Amino acid sequence: MMSQMPRQAALPTCPSCAEPLDAGDRFCGACGYDLSAVPPRPDDHPTLTMNGSTQPAPPEGLGMNTGVGVGMTGTPVPGAGPGLPGATGAALPPPDGPGAPPPPPPGAPVPSAVSPAAPATGVRFDRPPEPDEYALQAPDPRVAAEAAAGAEPAKMCVACRAGRVDDDGYCENCGHAQPRERDHMELESGPLAAVSDRGLRHHRNEDAFGLGCTALPDGSPALVAIVCDGVSSATRPDDASLAASRAASAALLAALPQGTHPQAAMHEAIVAASHAVNALAAEPATAREHAPHQNAPACTLVGAVVTAGLLVVGWVGDSRAYWVPTDRSSPAARLTEDDSWAAQMVAAGLMNEAEAYADERAHAITGWLGADAYELEPHTASFKPDRPGVVVVCTDGLWNYAEAAEEMAEVVPPDAAVRPLHSARVLVGHALDGGGHDNVTVAVVPFPAPVQGAGSA
């Protein structure tokens, strides 16, 4: 590494001829310049004129440090930087060196580079005056109306009731995760209604339902209710229940007005629901490669068609339908038989009902809708009640807490036929109060179908 030597102090030079001077010299030995005189102030070359005179603004794109020197008169200075194309004007002489004007005599006033009549103000005058305010164009009322119509009201948090819910489903105030759309669903369609809830233990709602009102060819009303329960051990059980409920209710609402017998229409609706669930298993081969162990989507189904004098039910799996008379003068009844291990044990005489449903295998279903079902066997039954009442169509999330028909009748409110939505809420609340271990879905359908319930749903 090279050592650094201290620099020798530079000797003073004559301001006139630049000859070196010795300390204490009062006159230059070369030219005789009086060293006691005050040297003139050197000229500076500012980038922008500051003498108050109006000068043209610099070309666009050039900033304060463009490298183009401009003298006090606005003429380009050679050597101060790259010149502008087409620039003209005389160059200013350098402040020192040969050809410089002789210095003033001692005691003479030093000339100023700026005229006293135009002191530098530090303000540019080469910019036109700007108005304090700019006129704004009046807004188009049509644009404002469209924006107001398209704006959706902000969702409020269900927990703190104060924060707004962001696009990810969380409260911006307390951070609480909001319920998903299917966590709790309610629908009232004419004289019938249904409620579905996620329950207290499941992370999502895998139940679904479909409701509708239509008219038979003779003009009499017909009510349709479909309830489906996704099989949790299968893939996408929530998609399966939704597809089945939509397909079955749509098939019934299309077939009944054409004169198809309600029981035959129910059978065909279950077949249509089965096809809809089977279609969910038609996944790309790559999807199966990532999860080869997963089962095909599957669900159970139970449905009811109520007309002026006929009650038809259909089912596959362990979702149920109950009959509850309005006056309670006759006993309630269960209208379906489960496709389950417990039901098979009872039917075979191997166990009584209490023993079978106490077994841990009781709710293992033996029939369902899905591509891997053993064989589709839609069950249908028709009844002609002799008195008014309601049909309770539900998943096992409800009947686990009111299994016997008598227990269900105790839970159903007396005015269920005229307040179906309230009654469905009461039944769901009963299941949640009992523990809510499963998803809970229930539809309440009055019998006979009231005339005012006719029409398209």
Image (tube, rainbow, N blue to C red):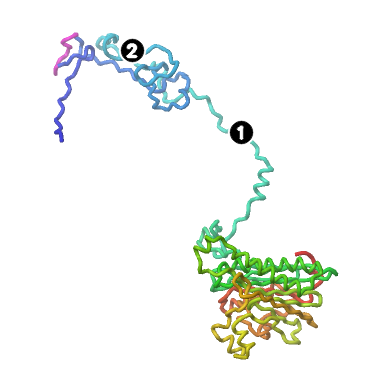
Secondary structure beneath label 1: loop
Q: Is residue 197 visible?
A: no
**Looking at the image, which is closer to me, 230 or 276?**
276
Alpha carbon of mark 2 to alpha carbon of mark 1: how far?
A: 50 Å
Question: Can see residue 77?
Answer: yes
Quadrant containing the C terminus in the rendered view: bottom right
The percent coordinates of residue 344 (x first, y second) are: 62, 85
The percent position of residue 70, horizontal first and vertical second, equals: 40, 19
Of tags 2 and 1, the one toward the viewer is: 2
The quarter of the displayed image where residue 144 is located: top right
Q: Which mark is residue 93?
A: 2
Q: Residue at x 62, y 55 (%)?
A: 153
Tell me which amino acid carries mark 2: Pro
- Would residue 80 appear left or right of 329 to someone viewing this image? left
Q: Is residue 387 left or right of residue 232?
A: right
Q: What's drawn in magenta, residue-wise?
A: 22-31
Question: Any magenta on residue 123?
Answer: no
Does label 2 or label 1 sit earlier along the sequence?
Answer: 2
Farthest right residue?
218
Label 2 crowd bin: few (<14), some (14–19), many (20+), radius 10 Å: few
- On the image, which quarter does residue 133 sit in? top right
Q: Main secondary structure of the magenta part?
A: loop
Question: Residue 6, percent across and down?
Answer: 14, 30
Q: Amino acid at mark 1?
A: Ala
For mark 2, give the secondary structure. Answer: loop
Characterize the local packing of mark 1: few (<14), some (14-19) or many (20 or more) Cα atoms within 10 angstroms. Answer: few
Front residue of 444 and 12: 444
Q: Residue 237 at x, y = what percent?
A: 58, 69
The one of 92 and 256 positioned closer to us in this rendering: 256
Which label sits on residue 135? 1
Check the picture and name the quadrant holding the N terminus: top left
